[in-house]
Amino acid sequence: MSNVLDLVRPDLRDFAGYASARRESVTGKVWLNANESPLPSPADPGLALHRYPEPQPAALRNRLAELYGVAPERLMVTRGSDEGIDLLVRAFCRAGVDKVMVLPPCFGMYSVCARVQNAPLVEVPLKEIDGAWTPDLPAMLKATAKRDVRVVFLCSPANPTGQALSLHQIQALAQATEGRAVLVVDEAYAEYSAVASATGLLDQYPHLVVLRTLSKAYALAGARIGAVLADAGVIRVLRNLQAPYPLAAPSAAVALAALAPAAVAEARRRVQVAIRERDDLARTLARVEGVLRVYASEANFLLVRFADAEAAYRQLLRNGVVVRDVRAMPRLGDALRISVGTPDENLALLKALQKRAAA
Ligand SMILES: *Cc1c(COP(=O)(O)O)cnc(C)c1O
């Protein structure tokens, strides 16, 4: 089996990153090594914020590893998945040389991070057949055969289509990319999906990377906590590229609290409610005049095509309902992306749309 670390940028292979005060494993009672204030701020709510935080808080890392079913050395806690996406492109793509593959229409951060690293972008559009969005496997194979694609971003369930890839599809892509590229599966919406996580394939494919986040199902978008799940060697490489103290202590503390058993149970209960709301909303929306198509969704949002998306968008705004205008995305010129809200919020959305139909 080829070694995934052979895909790391050659100039980074012996790069050890910044040796921060917190990375040295020393112990003591008097801490005079990091130029911190010896006293906490009067505004400190008891979190000892006068000290630099742990780069990878052990308790949080262990708890996330347990939640996602991987060994802790296979997990890196990140400042949201956004940071994981950025670090992966930096680690594997030489500027101007190694390419990033995306499957549009897709989440915009992949191409933004590629652009920042000056990694050329290869776009292999998803194919839409009878309301199902599927990767164009032959076109992807053709593109990876050239061996200059280093990172492939998949999203499952995908933003903005809402649809999930099967493990068979991911496995086929993992086989095709082995020894050539890192295959990233962004699972930001996994909790809302019936399809199993790709983490089960990590043992088999060291070049596979899974991204998870607490921003959606765990209601912590404001805390900025995500996780990269990967081969332990890949995690070590990414750790060396990460900022010295990436995780703010209050965010790490609230994330750990959100992963206590009772909080996880509540998050799962809410996910079940969101799934029911999503499916109800999809059925109701499909009957609203001017709605052309509501795509089946495995996430906490719906992608909807309208006869007049501009009018629908404006009508919603006039009623104080803000949805995501995705019309600038390829082949979504008539579509809006609608997050599933509370039952009351979903009702407000429907009322606003129906008002338009009546007008
Ligand atoms: C919302 C979302 C994320 C989450 O990003 P964070 O940085 O963790 O908040 C990741 N990927 C996709 C596709 C998303 O839609």
Image (cartoon, rainbow, N blue to C red):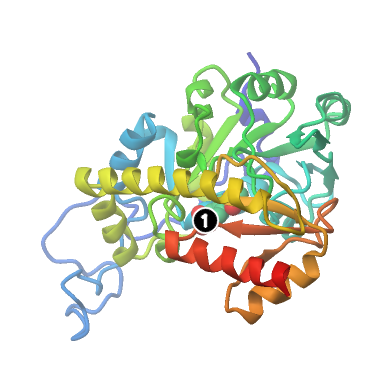
Q: From the viewer's perspective, tell me whether residue 265 is left or right of residue 234.
A: left
Comparing 44 with 325, the one in front is 325
Residue at 63 percent of width and 13 percent of height = 1
Residue located at (21% from left, 83% from top): 41
On the rendered structure, is 78 left or right of 110?
left
As drawn, the residue found furthest toward the top would be: 1
Q: Is residue 59 visible?
A: yes
Question: Which residue occupies the foreground of this view, 149 or 353?
Answer: 353
**In the image as oriented, which residue stretches furthest toward the left?**
29
Left or right position of 262 against 324? left
For residue 86, above or below residue 43: above
Q: Is residue 277 left or right of residue 318?
A: left
Q: Position of residue 306 (x, y in %)?
A: 78, 58
Which residue is outermost to the front?
358
Residue at the spot of label 1:
340
* Residue 154 place in picture, x, y as percent: 67, 38
> Up-down: is 187 above or below 343?
above
Residue 126 appears at what percent x and percent y? 80, 38
Instruction: Find numbered disc 1 in the image and state the secondary structure of the residue it sits on.
Output: loop
